[in-house]
Amino acid sequence: MDYKDLRVFLTVAATQHLGQAGQQLHISPSTLSRRIARMEEDAGAKLLVRDSGPLTLTPAGELFFQHAEQTLDAWESMRSAVNADVSELEGSLTLYCSVTASYSFLADLLARFRERYPKVDLRIHTGDAAASIPRAESGDADVVIAARPEQLSPDLTFRGISESPLLFIAPKAVGTVPQLTQSEIPWAEVPMVLSETGLARTRVNQWFASRSLTPNIYAQVTGHEAIVSMVALGVGVGVVPQVVLQNSPLLSRVRVLSVTPELEPFLIGLCSRTERLNEPVLQALWQTAGR
């Protein structure tokens, strides 16, 4: 059991709700449930009572809660003592990510990094999420925040931070897309708003191919945020990561469709060229992300 699991348990215990804890941690409730089950297996006892109401700690869970707090406090004290002089680290670091990632994943990471390494010059570039991995491959960015591709180049190293489900979304107003009012959705006829390139587009294409269908593409756009905008306008159905939808100002104007089989979720994390990971500044960011 690692320190991340202990932090996850403390968050779940504090919120008493998997959904609320998942929003804070950027982890889906189903993934949280599996992690709690794994912790319970390691501990050899049930840690949480999962009835219809708020989650509560079992007697074993109370002991585990105390253990988690004490362990993390001891770790932070040790880390502070060992790294007392690390703040003298200097240099620059160029990071690329999407706009959504900049405030959903990057904010907390950079706050911790800036506190530890105030002399490092951070240069943040934002743009289309689909461009993240290519920028890491080309060296245009020292590190990127991106969804892990299905095939990762052997020249790159990826470190997962969080998981985000990939969702089908439709306009909130029922009947805006007539095909969705039918008992069984005729997917070959539904107008789709899809990413022009990238992992989400690949997985949507695979989903349709597995059903021997060709998507009826109304529009192809750059950036998941633009997909939410177009769906909110009522032009069709889109596919976006949950983290994009949760942080969209148009959240109230769209709805999530219950679709089976579900699309494979995104594993989001840091990605850099492997040959550069021994550079002190990059190594410092990599280590910060793991704490």
Image (spheres, rainbow, N blue to C red):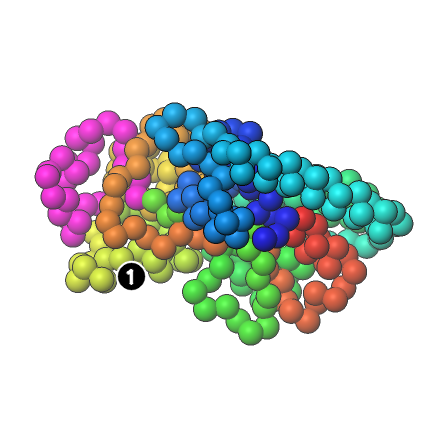
Which element type, helix, strand or loop, lies under badge 1?
helix
For this rendering, which residue is in front, 236 or 34? 34
The tally of labels here is 1
Residue at the (44%, 53%) spot, across then down: 266
For this rendering, which residue is in front, 37 or 23? 37
Where's residue 283, x and y in %?
73, 59
For disc 1, the marked residue is: 206
Where's residue 192, x and y in %?
26, 47
Q: Magenta region, mostly helix, strand or loop?
A: loop
User: Label 1: how many residues lie within 10 Å, few (<14), some (14-19) or many (20+)?
Assistant: some
Would you place residue 224 above or below residue 275 in this image?
above
Magenta segment includes 189: yes
Residue 78 falls left or right of residue 5: right
Residue at the (49%, 59%) spot, across then down: 148
Where's residue 11, x and y in %?
56, 35
Would you place residue 271 above or below residue 216 in this image?
below
Magenta segment includes 37: no
Would you place residue 246 above or below residue 40 in this image?
above
The answer to whether residue 92 shows anywhere in this view is yes
Give, as a single range, the part of the protein colored magenta.
Answer: 168-191
Residue 89 falls left or right of residue 270: right
Would you place residue 170 above or below residue 78 in this image?
above
Residue farthest bottom in this picture: 154
The answer to whether residue 128 shows anywhere in this view is no
The amino acid type of the residue labelled 1 equals Gln
Q: Quadrant of residue 190?
A: top left
Q: Quadrant of residue 6?
A: top right
For this rendering, which residue is in front, 233 or 273? 273
